[in-house]
Amino acid sequence: MRRYQLHFILAFSLLFLCACLYLVVGYLPARASLLYGPPAAHLSISDRIQYSTRLMAYGSTLTAPLDPNGAEQTFRVEQGETVFSIANRLAQVGLISDAQAFYDYMVYSGLDLTIQSGEYKLSPALSSVEIAHAFQKFSPGEATLVILPGWRMEEIAASLPTSGLTLDPQIFLTAAQAHPAVLDFLPPSASMEGFFYPDTYTLPRETPPDQLLDRIARNFAQHLTEDLKNGFAAQGLDVYQAVIVASIVQREAVQIDEAPIIASVYLNRIKLGMKLDADPTVQYALGYQPELNNWWKNPLTLDDLKFPSPYNTYQNLSLPPAPISSPGLAALTAVAYPQATPYYYFRAKCDGSGYHNFSATFEEQIANACP
């Protein structure tokens, strides 16, 4: 009996070690590469594993802005200044939340080797990843446009004056009502809403609107892999429908690691024929709120949920007629490959963390209400 128990313990230990090895050597580096891009080529295998593990432990620290409404400020990088010093100063002046996370991303990506000294206009409304890319080499004739996940096209237009591009926001919005030929899967009357791939774009300052939109559209098309398309099809969605769902998931997932679970809720509702009841669709329908200086009203009132609009999924059974924001790769992947769950409901946790409680029944949903 003792020999049998010993063999069982050894077998279990071996399986556990194999699982841990896969997690560290296989899953975490692959996941980090998906979310943050490939690691720097000069890193050793052990360094790649080490930094991938660190990045995954930070959750949304690197991809979420410290303050979406934060004011722009001038930040100077001195000649020869170390990345560690830059990271600490960024945290001290309130531009990022975690200096170590910023440092680890710079080393992982190799951006620590190409920082350009000089003065930068930065804002806590930028994520740590976007600030990291802002420090790369530029020339006076270039502009840098940053598109954040979850922005609607009006928010992108509003960022143009501070990007260095000479493009008028209204001209940009008018041009965006059409779509470049590369997005051939869009309905004929569709605008580019939802297909402004979140990224940092370095462009000539005088870039005309059609070239800017073509550059952004091609970036989306390049990230629309066959794996994503196959995943969308497995959920019974075409590309346009999948981007609509992903645009909602992007707005709901305050903590982006929850995106696969949130996607499962909406896909479960679609399969059952339920209304989506998604707050972001109402926020999109309500539009700009002058008193809040914001496009996304929060919290919503009961009257808001009755607002008449084809985008209001509390009032309409179908999907919204178009995406409501531009989803990032994590949200798109979550719709293509959602977590398998029995959930049909979720609501924000009461601790202010941005995470949610999920439930399979309406009774459980009611019980999860904050006191």
Image (tube, grey):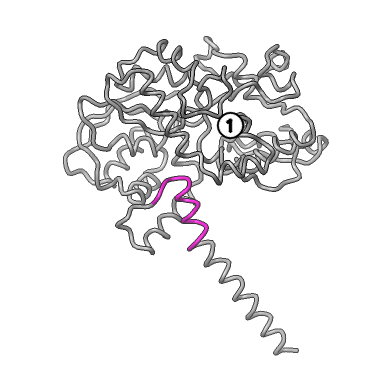
Mark 1 residue element: helix
Picture coordinates of residue 190 (x, y %)?
56, 19
Residue 201 falls in image quadrant: top left
Q: Front-most of 314 and 322?
A: 322
Residue that appears at 71% across and 32% down: 370
The answer to whether 116 appears left or right of 253 in the picture is left
Residue that appears at 20% across and 32% down: 118
- Number of marks in picture: 1
The answer to whether 202 appears left or right of 2 in the picture is left
Q: Front-most of 136 and 337?
A: 337
> Which residue in the structure is indicated by mark 1?
243
The answer to whether 151 appears left or right of 303 in the picture is left
Residue 313 falls in image quadrant: top right
Q: Is residue 30 magenta?
A: yes
The region drawn magenta spans: 25-38
Crowding near the residue tagged with mark 1, few <14, some 14–19, many ≥20 C-alpha atoms within 10 Å: many
